[in-house]
Amino acid sequence: MATSEPYDIGMLSVAENEKITRVGPGTPMGNLMRRYWQPAALSRELPESDGPPLRVRLLGEDLIAFRDSDGKVGLVDAFCPHRRAPMFFGRNEECGLRCVYHGWKFDRSGACVDMPSEPADSLFKTKVGIAAYPTWEGGGIVWAYMGPRAKQPAPPDYEWVRAPDTHRFVSKTHEDANWLQGLEGGLDTAHSSFLHNEKLGDKSLLRSRDGHPRLEVEKSAYGFRYASLRDLGDDGLYVRIYQYMMPWQQQRGSVTALSGGRNKVPKAAGHLWVPIDDTHTFVYNTLVSYDAQVPIPDAYAWEEEARFGRGKDDLLPGFRLRANIENDYQIDRNVQKTTTYTGIRGVNTQDMALQEGMGPTCDRSKEHLGTSDRAVIAARQLLLEACDAVERDEEPPGADPATYCNVRPYDNFLSRDDNWREAFASELIAKW
C-alpha cells in the first residue's frame, strides 16, 4: 500500500501488522511511539532519594531509573559506556549513579561527573557520557521522552494527571503480549457483554442486556471519541462514551458508587498499554473521582483492584498476575457452567486470558471484523497514518497536550429522542 493513500482497513495484512506492532528503535511504530511521553515506572517504584536503582525496559530498550539526591528521576542506559557493566548494581549517591566496576559516575542528564580510574588531570570524562532520557513526574507516574529533543512536546496533561492525589489511583500489570492486543481489547466495547458477564441470567447488568451495541466513532486531533449505545428496552439507551488518546490510552466513564455505596459519584477509569518490547506490555490502570467532595481512599481503590483480579494478593513480583497462562488463569469450569461466562475470576484476568492466549503477536490477516469493531478499525487506521506522518517529519496526533487536555469520558442513560452529543456536551469537558 502506498503511504500517500488513505488506509481503508478491515483486517491487516502481514506487512501492516508488522508495521503497527514492532516498537524497537528505527521501526515505524517505534519512531511514532518515541514522539510521545511514555510511562516508564510508577513513582512509588522509586520511593526515596538515593534509593536502589530500578530496571526499566521500554520500547525494546534496557534502561535504569534512579531517584537522585535532589529527588529527581534519571533514566539512563542499562550498561556503562566504559566496559558495558550493568548499571543496576551501581551506587546511587550524591546526585549520580556510579558504576561499581571502575567507579565512573553519571548524573541524570547522562554526563560523566567522576572518573576515578583515570588520572586526575584527564579530560576523558568530558568526552564520555551515558545515554539518558528526559523524565517528568505527574499523576503518580514517571514519564520519559525518548524521541528527538527538538520534537519534545510539553509534559502529559491528561485530566486524570491533573486530579489531586487524593482523587486518583494508578496501578500497573504485566502482560505477555504485544501492546496492540491490549489496546484493541480496551477499544472493543462489545466483548464486555460476554467476557465480563459475572452473573449469568442477571438482566440488571447493563452491558449484558444488549450484546450488540451501536458504535459511533468521531475522529479528533488527539485520536477519537466513540460512543456505544445499548438498547435497554423500556429504559431507553445506555450510552458509554470513551476517549482514545494516541497512541496507547483509553479512558471510559463510569457512574459508580463510592463512599461505601451511599452516593452515586461520577468517575472514570482507563488504561495505558505501554510497550515493554514487541511481545510484552505494561498496562497502567487509572481511576479518578470527578467529585471534589469524594476522594478515592486507598482501601476502596485496592478493593476495586481485587475485583478486577489485580489486587495485592493477585500479583507476583514484576506486576505479573498469579492467575496466568501457566495455570490457565485458574479457570473453574463448574463456575463457568453455572455462574459466570468464563469461570475466570477478575475482569483484568479475563482480558489477559484472551489477549495473551492469542499468542505474543496476533496474526490479524486471519480476522473477520464486524460492525462492533469500528473503534478497533479506526485506531488501526490512525496508527498507520501517524507512522506515515512521522516518516514525513510531521507532527503526530495527540502529542500536543492542547489537543486532549480538556476532554473526559462519560456514561449515563438517555432517551431515544435525545442526542448524546448535545445531552452530555458539558459532561465531556474536563473539570480538574
Image: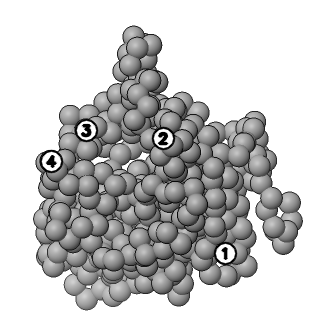
What amino acid is at disc 2? Answer: Arg
Position of residue 319 measured from the top left corner of the image (x, y, whole percent): 31, 43
Q: CA distance from mark 4 to mark 3?
A: 16 Å
> Looking at the picture, does residue 186 appear above or below residue 169?
above
The residue mark sitting in front, 3 or 1, is: 3
Pointer 1 residue: 390
Residue positioned 64% across, 59% down in the render: 216
Label 1 sits on what residue type? Val
The residue singled out by tag 2 in the image is: 207
Q: Which residue is mark 4?
A: 260
User: What is the crowding at mark 2: few (fewer than 14 residues within 10 Å), some, or many (at least 20)?
Assistant: many
Residue type at mark 3 is: Ala
Q: How far is mark 3 from mark 2, CA to CA? A: 21 Å
User: Could you tell whether 408 is left or right of 236 in the image?
Assistant: left
The residue depicted at 22 percent of the width and 76 percent of the height is 72
Query: Can the viewer see residue 111?
Result: yes
Cα separation, mark 3 vs mark 1, equals: 40 Å
Q: Nearer the viewer, residue 39 or 220?
A: 220
Which of pointers 4 and 1 lies earlier in the amino acid sequence? 4
Q: Is there CB contact under 8 Å for labels 3 and 1?
A: no
Q: Earlier in the sequence, mark 3 or mark 2?
A: 2
Asked if marks 3 and 2 touch (Cβ < 8 Å), the reply is no
Residue 161 image point, x, y percent? 32, 71
Spot occupied by residue 278 in the image (x, y as percentages of width and height): 56, 49
Q: Residues within 10 Å of mark 4 (few under 14, many from 20)?
A: few
**Mark toward the start of the polypeptide (4 vs 2):** 2
Q: CA distance from mark 2 to mark 1?
A: 38 Å
Asked if 144 appears above or below 193 in the picture, the reply is below
Q: Nearer the viewer, residue 170 or 423?
A: 423
Separation of disc 4 and disc 1 at Cα? Answer: 48 Å
Residue underneath mark 3 = 306
CB within 8 Å, label 2 to label 1: no
